[in-house]
Amino acid sequence: MPSIIAQDLVELLKQLLRGLPERIWHTFTTTDMFYHSIQVATSLTEVEWETVLLASGIMFKSGNTTTFSKQHLEHLKNALQESLILNITLSQLQGTGKQPFL
């Protein structure tokens, strides 16, 4: 099966995720407004984290809409299953205006 996420990006994500505390949920979102985001926990800037997510295909943008790929997240989970346990929960938050929804 061809790799959905390039192996070098899988390794980068492995290194980033390995340092996170266990049994605490972290979001893949690109915001520093929520303490338990991977971006904040790994001390990456919003631009750095967004670049990793876009390059891996985990996140993609269409206009003003940001979407996360369940297929890519599942691929990452399977690729890292021998070294990390990832639990993936997807939520869709809808709203109007520019208020953050957490």
Image (cartoon, rainbow, N blue to C red):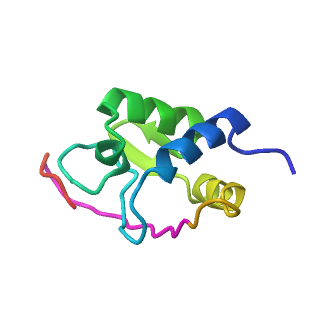
Q: Residue furthest right?
A: 1
- At 41% from the left and 34% from the top, the residue drawn is 50
Q: Nearer the viewer, residue 82 or 38?
A: 82
Relative horizontal placement of residue 95, taking residue 39 as reference (left or right): left
Residue 25 occupies quadrant: bottom left
Residue 11 is one of the magenta-drawn residues: no
The location of residue 87, given as percent across then percent down, is 51, 70
Relative horizontal placement of residue 28, taking residue 31 as reference (left or right): right
Q: Which residues are magenta?
A: 86-97
- At 58% from the left and 47% from the top, the residue drawn is 14
Q: Quadrant of the C terminus?
A: bottom left
The location of residue 62, given as percent across then percent down, is 44, 38
The location of residue 42, given as percent across then percent down, is 36, 42
Looking at the image, is 59 positioned above or below residue 102?
above
The location of residue 15, given as percent across then percent down, is 54, 43
Residue 40 occupies quadrant: top left
